[in-house]
Image (cartoon, rainbow, N blue to C red):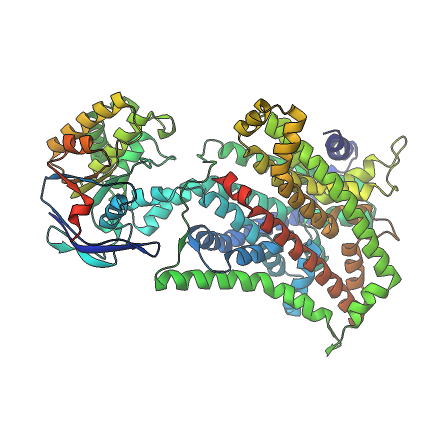
Amino acid sequence: MIAIITFVVLPTFNIFVSSLRFESLNLLRTETIRNVVWFTTWQSLVSTAFALVIALPLAFVTANFRFKAQRLTTSLVSVPFILPSIVVGVAFLQILPNSFHRTAFALILAHTYFNFGFTSRLITARWLQIHPHLDDAARTLGASPLKLFTTVTLPLLGKAITNAALIVFTLCFTSYGVVRILGGPSRSTLETEIYFRAIQLGDVSGAMLLSALQILIIVSLFVVTTRASRNRFEQSTRPTISRQKSLQTRKQKFIATTIISIATVFAIVPLLAIAFKSINTNSKFTTTAWRTIFTSPEISHSLIKTLTYAVIAMTLATLLGLLSACSVAYNNNFRLISGLTTLPIVISAVSIGLGIIITFDTKPFDWRGTQFMLPLAHALVALPLAMRVILPVLQAIPDSLRQASSVLGASPQQTWLNIDLKIIRRAVISAAAISAAVSIGEFGASSFLARRGAETLPITISRLLSRPGDSLQSQAFALATLLAIFSLITIFVIDSFANTKFARESHA
Amino acid sequence: MLEIDKVSIIYDSSQLFANLSLTIKHHEIVALTGPSGSGKTTLLRCIAGLESISTGSIRLNGLEITNQPAHLRNIGMVFQDNQLFPHLSVGQNIAYSLKIKRTPKKNTDKKVREVLSLVGLNHLIDRTVINLSGGEAKRVAVARALIAEPQVLLLDEPLTGLDVELHGRLLEDLSKLLRTRGTTVLHVTHDKAEASAIADRVLDLRQLIS
């Protein structure tokens, strides 16, 4: 909590106070900024709508049917969400024709790609909680499949869809890496404008004002949406019988195969494109780019730095996530902790980076140049995810297990170590994996905090892409492929642990 | 009249039963008993159109309905665990089938109040179904099925899990209600006393297999 208050709340507060102090409010009246706000908003809305359009049919298939390679498919379509944003940007730069570069279409497509699997997972999780006999009841009362969907399924999925849409909109609204790579200077969003003003123009006051505006918009949206969906019904347990049935009719097989194929191809093609480009320099197949990334002192240094930061960020985020999850799980009304750990989602990585820069650049807290600021920022960005991986598993442990342990003579500490920790250990490993993945791919805060000579891989990729020459581009693609491979490993680690016996039972 | 003719059901790759035949006359209440796992519920689900039969046929009032989807059969079902729609109030749950049929609101409201008074729950019309007691939820489930005026009502262990006093009271009320309305009923239960109390005919599932 102290860490969140010091490195998220305090810098955010500082952004607000400083933005009011400067006489830069006129900036908001300029046409450039009005256009930026408008573009940021509409591209986020369209991206969210597109992500939902792909996610809903996918969720329908994964929640209602059992099919071969279901786990593999689910993992594959989840990969885009955990990919570093810069990798997604680079991938679409490669697969889209040049005429589509720097267009709103490219951004929307990349944002849709980034979020559709995650959206589908959120909706699937809720769909699986809807008792299949509710469908049967509606059918025996005369509801056709379409009526069943509109009168029962959709209202029961409402809150999950709203929550997913809210998160996706926020992620698109605060998207940085994708916009930097695909949008360029002509397609600027609030997030890239903050960076552009602070770093390129040196207009820190303007950047702070835009950052404050962005935070205000997102917070208002969260408050309004949360209030609007407060009274919506939401079941929290999975029914005792599964709603997933094997594919029986030809129609079912055709629909499921089509939806799964489209989603899987959409998830894989951009990854294959970057891998292909990494071994294709000047239209020739070569492994030079791969050899270079492991032998070039500059890139090797960046690789080592990235891994070092990832280890520190992973340790910090996992520990903080575990402590936060314990605080929330053991004190049901501990909403403050839950709210504080959500802050890094609401406050974008770029704003966290900017806040840290303006807050910790004066004595006695002149920490801006220190090595620990970057991994700390990464840990804070990863914290909401780490905490939310551990919390549901912790909350699913029945109190009767702890009581049984106590009456068998175990102290509270022994009970925690032998019951709680043993049950959540896989979730903790998953949280660690996801934290490491976030740190390795983090681009927004790093753009502000990475010092020259201590660049992380995403910064290095961005620099390589900005230089002319096909071989340098191939090196960027090889590094992007490396990051993608790491993301793939992470998602498979998370999914294999999520499918363990206890995790399955804890949902029952 | 409901006619089930030489029906076989394969469930999860194993045969539950083969060549099962049963006829239920108009306005008749038939109770079907049998041990747990014998396939009573699956048979009801097949009659309702929620599961498919492997062989045989199901006819309702002379019409073949074997391959008809559940929503077109006009066969009502009360589930063991009620399955009330959690996002709808008591009144909205009961009005569900009328809303599906686009019945005018005035008629719907009138019918809902009539059915609610039959089950003695008029005062709960606007209540959420989440906090209903076991007995209240059961009455709402029966009212919801009855308002659709099904040609056959299937009751899947409707009184299981209720305490003895409530079980007795509900059994009496249910029996009276079904007879007053002249509903054709197939009632599945493992409780032979309950079956005898409610039904015109009590059959053992195993007797129906030729």
User: Residue at the spot x=88%, y=53% of the render?
Assistant: A453
Total numbered badges shown on the rendered structure:
0
Q: Quadrant of residue A329?
A: top right
Q: Quadrant of the N terminus of chain A?
A: top right
Q: Residue furthest bottom?
A: A284
Residue at x 61% of width, y 33% of height: A419
Q: Nearer the viewer, residue A50 or A98?
A: A50
Q: Residue at x 30, y 27 (%)?
A: B162
Image location (x, y in percent) of residue A35: 65, 49
Answer with the quarter of the image where residue A218 lies: top right
Q: Residue furthest right?
A: A363
Please name whichever residue, A468 or B61, is drawn nearer the observer in this view of the structure.
B61
Q: Is residue A215 visible?
A: yes
Left or right, A375 with respect to B57, comes to right
In this rendering, does residue A142 appear at all?
no
Q: Pinpoint residue B155: horizontal percent, then vertical percent.
A: 23, 38
Position of A423 with respect to A238 (left or right) is right
Question: At which x and y percent is residue A39?
Answer: 62, 51
B157 left or right, relative to A412: left
Residue A324: image location, x then y, percent: 67, 32
Q: From the viewer's perspective, tell me whether residue A96 is left or right of residue A362.
A: left
Where B118 falls versus A428 (above or below)? above
Depth check: give the residue in front, A125 or A452. Answer: A125
- Give the residue at x 78% y 66%: A475
